[in-house]
Structure formats: structure tokens, C-alpha cells
Image: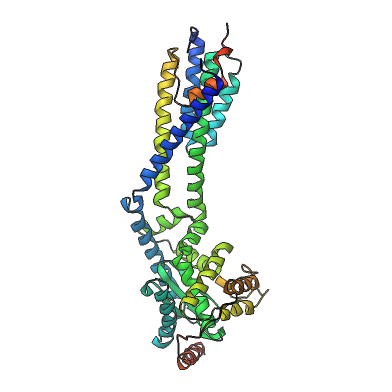
Amino acid sequence: MHIHPIGEQDAEKASNSYLMSLVFIMAGLPLPIVNLIASLIFYFGNRKAGYFVRWHCTQTLLSQFSLLFINSTGFWWTVSIIFRGEEVTSGYIAYLITALIFNLLDFGSTIYAAIQTRKGIHVKWFFFGVLTDLICPPTQLPS
Amino acid sequence: MPSNSASIVKIFFQFLVLAGLFFATLFGLRQIDWLHLFQIETVSRKTEEKIGALSWELIRNTSHEIKSKEPVRALKKLTDRMASVSGIDPNHVKIHLLEQDEINAFALPDGHLIVFSGLINDCRNEAELAGVLGHEIAHIERKHVMKKLAKELGLSVLVSATTGSQHNSEFLKETVRVLSSAAYDRSLETEADQTSVLYLTKAGIDPKPFARFLARMPKGKDEDPSGIFSVSTHPDSDVRSKEILEQIGDQTFESNPVLTEEEWKSLKARVSEEIQ
């Protein structure tokens, strides 16, 4: 994909979109919706920004959606155990570990993407990158 | 630049890979017995044993236990028959008979089953009594007791109350209060009723008297027995009775009494004597 030369400000904003989601992963683990809200705020705040920034905000937002489903399931399962007396099962622990693995993967990818985009290097994630291309087609690139 | 349709196919394919990876990880991890690995079962079993023993100790110290062997043996005979035909270890059910006028029975953690003499007095035959005992065994076997405690008192309280060096007496009083005077969720009560009917039928005991017993329960009195049949918390004992009759349907049952006529009469007589 051809990317126009990235300005210092754009690189910083794009990198911040990842950092934003990273910071909120901490808060979002107990309350998953926080992640998504944080990414949404950043996404809408940068709608009018350059293509590079918008593209990366979109990729962050999409990845947060998938984490929202994974973490919400774990969250409500835990709530039902604590407050509704549901049993702790091996399936529950297996789910928590799976969710943790995918959160760590997201965490690592986010750090990597934040560093790379800060340097103005384009990072395209598996699945989310292609999906982002569809939502933010490169034809929207400013001439 | 790929066309939109090519991108959609690619997205779909990559989504499948990602979702497949997630479920494969989950499936793989699911094969491990984490409860055993982290000794969660052992901890929860020990917690249950401890709460059960301490709660029973508290009740024994504050109530009058009927220690005559004969009535307890008769009750044990009823529970043993139901347990043995239902794949339950009969020794897990520990019967304790208390001198109390209330028509009540309730389960404590770790299989302690408290029966009030008022219940035996009120039952017209062994099938009615067996129905109530079966209901409580179901609460024990389906782990309703710990679920209820976790819901009412909180999981963390349960663990901290039993792991501390000094056991919280307020916590134990609350445990006994919750288990003896507050009803289970409607769904758990229904499950216990249905399971009791299964125990009864497997044991060759007619479950219809159990339904009749529920229908006979007094309604609308505040002083009505607490626990399983409390009117304030169980305004629907008629409904439960009907549900049991629906579950039984047209089935007929051959009477296969657990206690002899003499044993039943003796049980009633001994309990009456103790009350007087």
C-alpha cells in the first residue's frame, strides 16, 4: 500500500490511538466497555484528521470491538460466579486463560503498532488491517 | 489494489482463521483439569466441610437435639433408600433431628440435613416425609446450599470466614439464618422438587403424598414454618404441588414402604414424646 509521507503530528496522533487503547486495557479488563468507549472517543475526535491517523484509529477501534466480546463474556461469567453463586469450572478457567492470551496478543501488537506508527511506519494487522482498508479505502487518500 | 469482493473474501477467511484460533485455544485449554491443577475443588470442599461442621455445631449448641437412636435411624433408613438407588453416597447425608415445633427441614453445607420434630409430627405417612427429605437431599446434591450462601453472603466472605484463624460467629449465625429461614430461588426449588420426585420413584415411594403435603401447607400466616415451605417466601406451594402432579402424570406406583407400619408409628410416637 502506498502511504504518503507522514507528518510528525500525524505519526504522533496515530501512535496515540494505540497508546490510548493500551492505557484503557488496564481499566477495561474489569469493565470491558471502557476500552471501546475510549477508542470511540479517540476515533470520533480524529475523524477530520489525516488519512494515516484515521486509518490507525479505525484499526484500533475494530480490534477493541473483538476484545469487547471476549472480555465481556469473561466479565459477566465472573459476575455470575461472584454474585449468583455459579460454580467455578475448568471451562471458566480455560476461558479466562484464553481471554488473557488474546488480550496479551493485543497488548503486544498494540505496543508494536504504537512504536512503528510513531516512526511513521504503516502497520497492518491480520484481519483488522484488511477490514480497515475496506472501511477507510486508500482512494480517500488526500491528493 | 484488490476489489471489494476480493477484500470481503479475504476478510471472511482471516476472520475464520482468527475465530478458529480462539476456539482452538479454548478447546485445547478446556482439556486440562484446571480445578484439580489449582486444587480449587479441594479448597471448596474443605470450605464446605468447615462451614457445615461449624454451622451444625452452632445449631447443636443453641437447640435441643433428639439423640434417641430409633427416630434418627428411621430417618436415615428413608434417606439411605433414596440415596442408594440414586447413586448418592448414603454416608454423605448426615441427619440431625431437632426438637422444634416448626414444620421444617433444611440442609447445611457438607450434607448436614436438619429435621425438625414438627415436620415428622405433621407428616401423615412416610412418603410425605420422604418427599421433604428428598427435596433437601436434592439441594445438597445439586450444590444449591453453597450457591445460596455464595449469593446471599458473597463468595469472598465464605472463603475468608473459613480461612481466618478466628471464625466469625456473626457469619455462622447469618449462615444458619440464611439456610434455615430463607427460600432458595424459585428455579432451584423447582429443581429440588423435581429431583425429589425422581429419588422417590426410584426408591419405590409414591410421590403423590409429597404433592399433597405441599398443597396442605398453611397459607398466609406469618408464623408459618420457615425454610423450604415458608409462606412469605413460598406463596406458591399450591403451584409446586400442581407441578409435581404434572411431573408424575398418569404414572402409577406400587407401594414399597421403607419403614414398617410399626417403625413409622414408633417414629411418630417417639418424636411426640420428646416434644412433650
Q: Is residue B239 visible from the viewing direction of this image?
A: yes
Where on the picture, by quarter, is residue B61?
bottom left
Report the label total. 0
Position of B139 relative to A47 (above/below)? below
Q: Please tell me which residue lies in front, A68 or B267.
A: A68
Q: Please tell me which residue lies in front, A40 or B258.
A: B258
Position of B42 relative to B179 (above/below)? above
Q: Which residue is drawn at 61% across and 67% down?
A: B233
Location of residue B105 in the rendering, given as x and y in whole percent from the top left corner = 51, 75
Q: Please tell me which residue lies in front, B19 or B56.
A: B19
Location of residue B262 in the rendering, given as x and y in whole percent from the top left corner = 46, 94
Q: Which residue is drawn at 36% across and 57% down?
A: B41
Q: Which residue is drawn at 41% across and 36% down?
A: B21
Position of B117 relative to B46 (above/below)? below
Extreme-bottom residue of the structure: B262
Where on the picture, by quarter, is residue B190?
bottom right
Q: Please tell me which residue lies in front, B12 or B53.
A: B12
Location of residue B91 in the rendering, given as x and y in whole percent from the top left corner = 36, 74
Location of residue B93 in the rendering, given as x and y in whole percent from the top left corner = 40, 73
Q: In this view, does B170 lie to the left or right of A49?
A: left
Position of B213 relative to A38 (above/below)? below
Q: Residue at x 57, y 74 (%)?
A: B248
Q: In this view, does A130 lie to the left or right of B52?
A: right
Q: Is residue B185 visible from the viewing direction of this image?
A: no
Q: Which colour scheme is used?
A: rainbow
